[in-house]
Image (cartoon, helix red, strand yellow):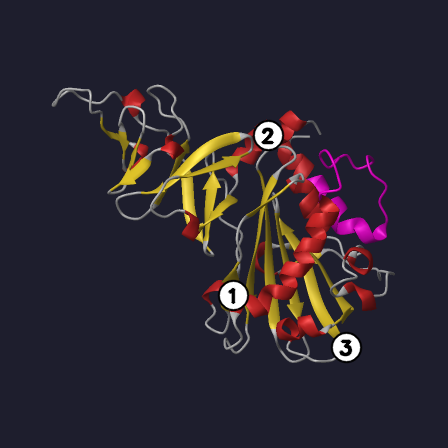
């Protein structure tokens, strides 16, 4: 796969990507970069999120350098104002009564809010957002984390998040120390909520710093897990404990460009809601940091050809995801 294939594939433009937390789009415009292109986000007259290319059609000023006044994005160069759906509603230098040229309007893009996040689709969406049914279940609470920038290609992140064979090596400092490195044969299957992947059980280390997350003080703990993907780049991991506690993690990787990505994860838990949110996810944060450190040692894009990399039986999920992702790209 070439760099241009990832960044310019028409299919990539028709899917949803996380570019910010909802709270990131507030009083001021926000610049984001997706698939090598720059966009501006702001809240319109009805508090809706509006997304458009980060360039004024007049003299190409980055609109993210401007301001938002009563839901209108104001260009700092000549004061042009853009309102709902990116329509130009005022050109200060133009006499009253003179109609605004259609070319002055911004090409508004598909943007929406879900799970406490801002999702952007540069083209015409071909499907809905990845589903997490626990988000509407009153027995579960949602915990968000900030959107970070990782110096690694987004497909490499997906490949990593679908893999359990790195647990005893990358995650020795958190939960991986008690896991058998031999992976039993598993089958790929359709999981709930439209994810495709596999089910497995692991015996995980449960250090003191993990007790809040797992709800147990035992040295080791059994986890019943699933890992599955939703094309193009979303991974969901579910963790179930004998106590009945469920811990759902949505892992979201967004390609800023060919080798840089946004990353955030969202957690849903059916705990008693009394545990402070940050304590409930602090162990997940430590696990994610172990992944980031390892992944940022890799360079370049992830080869997608079925024979480009050596694979073993335990890599079946990643191989299947790469096959489907490559087909989506047109490779």
Label 3 Cα neighbours within 10 Å, binned few <14 / some 14-19 / many ≥20: few
Percent position of residue 245, x then y: 61, 75
Q: Is residue 259 left or right of residue 116?
A: right
Residue 317 part of the magenta-drawn span: yes
Question: Badge 2 local density, few (<14 within 10 Å), some, or many (20+)?
Answer: some
Q: Is residue 151 above or below residue 6?
A: below
Residue at which label 1 appears: 134
Report the residue marked by disc 3: 219
Q: Please report the residue visible at 34 percent of the width from the left and 29 percent of the height from the top.
A: 106
Q: Position of residue 219 (x, y in %)?
A: 77, 77
- Of callouts 2 and 1, which one flags the residue occurring earlier in the amino acid sequence? 2
Q: Which residue is mark 2?
A: 7
Residue 33 locus on image (x, y percent): 51, 35
Magenta residues (range): 296-324
Q: In the figure, is residue 328 to the left or right of 98?
A: right
What is the quadrant of residue 94 in the picture?
Answer: top left
């Amino acid at each position: 796969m070439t760099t241009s294939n990832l960044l310019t594939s028409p299919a990539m433009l028709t899917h949803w990507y996380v570019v910010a937390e909802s709270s990131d789009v507030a009083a001021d415009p926000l610049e984001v970069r997706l698939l090598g292109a720059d966009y501006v986000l702001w809240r319109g007259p009805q508090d809706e999120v509006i997304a458009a290319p980060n360039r004024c059609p007049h003299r190409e000023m980055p609109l993210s350098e401007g301001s938002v006044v009563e839901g209108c994005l104001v260009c700092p160069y000549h004061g042009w104002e853009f309102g709902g759906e990116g329509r130009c509603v005022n050109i200060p230098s133009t006499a009253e009564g003179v109609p605004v040229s259609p070319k002055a309007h911004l090409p508004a893009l598909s943007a929406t809010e879900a799970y406490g996040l801002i999702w952007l689709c540069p083209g015409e969406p071909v499907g809905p957002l990845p589903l997490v049914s626990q988000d509407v279940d009153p027995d579960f609470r949602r915990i968000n984390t900030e959107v970070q920038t990782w110096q690694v290609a987004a497909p490499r992140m997906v490949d990593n998040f679908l893999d359990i064979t790195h647990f005893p090596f990358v995650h020795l400092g958190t939960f991986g120390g008690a896991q058998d490195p031999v992976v039993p044969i598993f089958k790929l299957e359709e999981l709930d909520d439209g994810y495709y992947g596999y089910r497995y059980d692991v015996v995980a280390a449960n250090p003191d710093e993990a007790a809040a997350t797992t709800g147990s003080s035992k040295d080791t703990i059994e986890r019943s897990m699933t890992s599955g993907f939703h094309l193009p780049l979303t991974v969901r991991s579910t963790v179930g404990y004998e106590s009945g506690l469920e811990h759902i993690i949505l892992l979201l990787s967004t390609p800023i460009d060919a080798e840089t990505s946004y990353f955030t994860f969202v957690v849903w838990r059916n705990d008693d809601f009394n545990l402070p949110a940050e304590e409930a996810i602090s162990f997940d944060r430590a696990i994610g940091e172990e992944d980031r450190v390892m992944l940022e040692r890799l360079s370049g894009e992830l080869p997608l050809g079925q024979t480009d990399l050596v694979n073993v039986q335990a890599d079946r999920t990643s191989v299947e995801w790469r096959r489907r992702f490559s087909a989506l790209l047109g490779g």
